[in-house]
């Protein structure tokens, strides 16, 4: 396979050409770290709405997915944390958006389960809290609740490097939810800072095997925003 | 005299055994990463996917892709590792971490913790807190003793929506260090000149 791989696209809009209103969309990143900046910009310019978005923070500090949130393109959101996202908190309290808050480990595992073909799992996380409402309970060594997988039509994720087959390599903590989302979505769109040759990522260092990736493009103009800059001796 | 944030962090650090692992929640607990002495060899875990956090970076080593769960830039030490969120929470839920230090809005004598929402007013979301309280071997809550309205946060029964049931082992506030045993807050240490009576906790809940 060469650079003419059928997986390689020229731009975010081309890679997302068939996303439709009402689709379920997973979006990688923790806060603003490792978000698919180019895909989010493209979605802010495309005519899609009523999206169900599955993302840990739905953007933060007025940036990232907040771009499409304030355009009211999101109907329902699954996330674990809205602190740091005042736009989402506002829409949520005004009931302009339906939000399901999911404990972060359960959130990860539900996405992983979807990708791994697991139909459900029992976890102690959330037992005895609001999260348990309406869920099947079962006691093992302690009370647990049944959690179900989270699937999506599309995932948009960002990696540092991809080869034309879609093998991915992430930098530092930018990996977070992205490998799980790549497995869970029907169509995974990956934007990268470096599109490398096949074989350039040593097999031992592949973080996501290309089988989980359907579309790749080389992104541009990355901001890589830092939310809270902390340095030694401050 | 009450303990400063730094003194509270040092108090928590004094509870750690050598060669252990700890997850630090956002807010007050992140101070621990900056103050923990290297010789304690405690590996710091952050649930966004890193083990081996070592405080703040030098200005020249700041990386936008290297952050903690509070979205603050961090540094890592030798022996650090990165992983995805599912594996990170596997470390937590699987019981592989020794300690977890979380912030709190309310803690009660049954070891219940509330720290994720005030109905109708404030929604932050639970983040990883609900998983953490069921994972780490010892759960430590680090918080101010009184809330902004001056009410004590250590109670007979939490009023706010819970993060977890029967999960808290130890509480460190600016007034003292407490363990939770047999439906009581057991005073392990009080800040200088702080009396039991000034804690805002009724006597029958203290031991």
Image (spheres, helix red, strand yellow):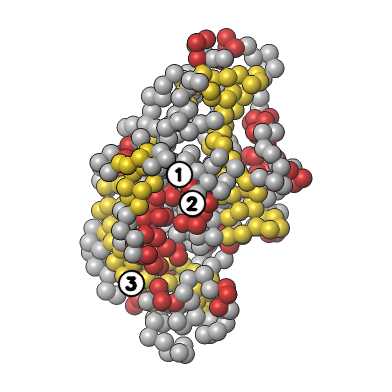
Q: Secondary structure at mark 1?
A: helix
- What residue did someone put label 1 on? B131
Q: Count residues near mark 3 (Cα–Cα under 10 Å), then give few for <14, some for 14-19, many for 20+.
A: many
Q: Chain of mark 2?
A: B
Quarter residue A21 falls in: bottom left
Q: Chain of mark 1?
A: B
Front residue of A95/B70: it is: B70
Q: Count residues near mark 1 (Cα–Cα under 10 Å), then give few for <14, some for 14-19, many for 20+.
A: many
Distance from label 1 to label 2 (Cα)? Answer: 7 Å
The answer as to whether the residues below labels 1 and 3 share one chain is: no
User: In this figure, what is the number of numbered marks?
Assistant: 3
Q: For the view shown, which residue lies furthest in the right direction?
A: B39
Q: Is residue A113 left or right of residue A161?
A: left
- What residue did someone put label 2 on? B89
Q: Check whether the beta carbons of the residues at disc 2 and disc 3 lie within 8 A of each other.
A: no
Q: Secondary structure at mark 2?
A: helix
Residue beneath the point at 66% across and 55% down: B76
Front residue of B20/A98: it is: B20
Where does residue B198 sit, x and y in percent of width and height?
A: 57, 12
Residue A84 versus residue B88 in the image, above or below:
above
- What residue did someone put label 3 on? A187
Q: Check whether the beta carbons of the residues at disc 1 and disc 2 lie within 8 A of each other.
A: yes
Distance from label 2 to label 3 (Cα)? Answer: 25 Å
Residue beneath the point at 65% across and 53% down: B52
**Viewport quadrant of the C terminus of chain A:** top right
Front residue of A160/A165: it is: A165
The answer as to whether the residues below labels 2 and 3 share one chain is: no
Q: Is residue B150 left or right of residue A65?
A: right
């Amino acid at each position: 396979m060469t650079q003419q791989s059928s997986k390689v696209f020229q731009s975010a809009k081309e890679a997302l050409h068939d996303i439709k209103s009402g689709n379920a969309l997973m979006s990688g990143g923790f806060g603003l770290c490792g978000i698919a900046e180019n895909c989010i910009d493209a979605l802010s310019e495309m005519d899609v709405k009523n999206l169900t978005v599955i993302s840990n923070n739905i953007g933060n500090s007025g940036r990232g997915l907040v771009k499409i949130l304030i355009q009211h393109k999101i109907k329902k959101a699954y996330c674990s944390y809205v602190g740091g996202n005042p736009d989402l908190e506002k829409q949520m309290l005004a009931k302009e958006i339906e939000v399901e808050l999911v404990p972060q480990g359960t959130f990860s595992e539900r996405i992983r389960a979807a990708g791994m073909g697991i139909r459900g799992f029992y976890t102690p996380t959330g037992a005895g809290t609001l999260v348990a409402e309406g869920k099947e309970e079962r006691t093992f060594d302690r009370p647990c609740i049944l959690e179900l997988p989270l699937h999506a039509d599309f995932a948009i994720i960002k990696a540092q490097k991809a080869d034309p087959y879609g093998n991915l390599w992430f930098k530092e903590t930018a990996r977070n939810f992205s490998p799980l989302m790549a497995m869970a979505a029907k169509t995974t769109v990956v934007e990268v800072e470096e599109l490398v040759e096949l074989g350039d990522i040593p097999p031992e260092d592949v973080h996501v095997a290309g089988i989980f990736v359907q579309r790749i493009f080389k992104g541009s103009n990355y901001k890589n925003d830092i939310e809270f800059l902390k340095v030694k001796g401050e | 005299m009450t303990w400063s944030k730094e003194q509270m962090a040092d108090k928590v650090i004094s509870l750690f055994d050598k060669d252990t692992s700890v997850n630090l929640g956002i807010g007050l607990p992140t101070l621990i990463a900056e103050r923990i002495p290297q010789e304690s060899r405690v590996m710091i875990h952050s649930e966004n996917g890193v083990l081996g956090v070592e405080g703040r970076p030098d200005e020249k080593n700041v990386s936008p892709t290297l952050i903690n769960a509070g979205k603050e830039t961090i540094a890592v030490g030798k022996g650090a590792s990165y992983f995805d969120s599912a594996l990170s929470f596997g470390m937590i839920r699987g019981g592989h971490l020794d300690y977890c230090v979380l912030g709190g809005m309310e803690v009660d004598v049954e070891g219940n913790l509330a720290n994720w929402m005030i109905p109708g007013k404030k929604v932050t979301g639970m983040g990883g807190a609900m998983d953490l309280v069921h994972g780490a071997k010892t759960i430590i809550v680090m918080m101010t003793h009184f809330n902004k309205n001056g009410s004590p946060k250590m109670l007979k029964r939490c009023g706010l929506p819970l993060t977890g049931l029967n999960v808290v082992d130890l509480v460190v506030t600016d007034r003292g260090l407490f363990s939770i045993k047999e439906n009581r807050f057991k005073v392990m240490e009080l800040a200088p000149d702080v009396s039991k009576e000034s804690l805002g906790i009724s006597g029958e809940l203290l031991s």
